[in-house]
Amino acid sequence: MCGRLEGRKVQRVGYSTLAVSLPGEWVKEVGLAKGDVVIMEKREDGRLELMPSAMVQRKKDRRETVVDADLCDERGVLTRVIVGNYVLGRDQIVVTSSHRITPLHLEEIGTATGILMGLSVIEETPNHVVMQCSIDPEKFPLDVAMRRMHSLSMTMYREAVEAFLKLDSDLAETVARREEQADKMYWLIVRLLLSAQQDPEMARKIGVGKMLRVVDDRLIAKFLEIICDYSEIIARRVISITEKSGKIPRSWADALEELSGLAFT
């Protein structure tokens, strides 16, 4: 339960023990029962953070996952499974195999770590690979991530149109390379949003005041990511045109420039 709890009186129950009552609403919300263990953590500013031990265990379970590579027998499946666990907030993803991990699976692991911000391989043996996410959500407030995604999409769009109108293959290459940054930022935003849904404290830390915002921002982020995808497509086609020494009629270029301006607005 986010928000401020009402004041509670402290009572002495022993020589070195003090007691304080807990709000009934919070007890019901977290499912606390008589005899349950409650964990307290001291923060640097002197605050105490109170949490039922069952919730701590659930958080730990959500942070770690093991993936059986033997079940990922179609190309691309392992990459999708890793991405799925990343956006669900897993901090450590372990890929295992009953035999030796195949070159294809190693390639897919490399693809996943290439498109997911903060995820890297920290341990590798013939039959298992450990990936760790080093992202600290508190250093990536949602507003900052969304602004970065917006800036990337608008930059890619403008540069893609300019590269097309001028048939500038170098600029088109720059746009295509930015797509990897856009993918990383998009998946990070999805990770932050899903983490906020699962953990009210996480939501507070990254600046999500209302859960309805999770739906709104997810939709906005997806549209921005689509803009980046189409910008890359334009860039790739510019490169193809220049390789074939193609040209664009002036009347077409003028019409497309006007349309792109309307789309951007």
Image (cartoon, rainbow, N blue to C red):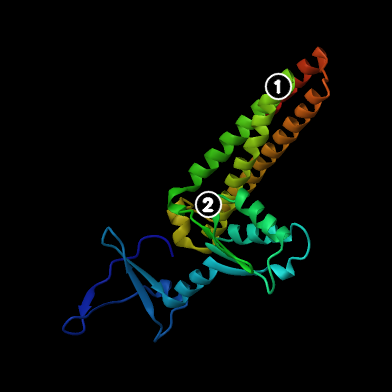
Left or right: residue 5 versus residue 171 is: left
Asked if residue 216 shows in the view, the reply is: no
Extreme bottom residue here?
35
Residue ID at (36%, 73%) = 23
x, y (%) of residue 128?
Answer: 61, 68
Above or below, 8 against 244 in this view is: below
Asked if residue 154 shows in the view, the reply is: yes
Q: Quadrant of residue 248?
A: top right
Above or below, 260 against 182 in this view is: above
Extreme left residue here?
15
Above or below, 65 against 218 in this view is: below
Residue ID at (71%, 63%) = 102
Q: Secondary structure at mark 2?
A: loop
Q: Which residue is mark 1?
A: 168
Amino acid at circle 1: Asp
Left or right: residue 175 versus residue 246 is: left
Amino acid at circle 2: Gly
x, y (%) of residue 108?
Answer: 69, 56
State the mark number for residue 29. none
Q: Marks 1/2: CA distance?
A: 33 Å
State the mark number for residue 118. 2
Q: Residues within 10 Å of mark 1 (few under 14, many from 20)?
A: some
Left or right: residue 264 versus residue 32 is: right
> Where is the N terminus found, in terms of image quarters?
bottom left
Q: Which is nearer the eye, 246 or 103?
A: 103
x, y (%) of residue 121?
Answer: 56, 58
Q: Secondary structure at mark 1?
A: loop
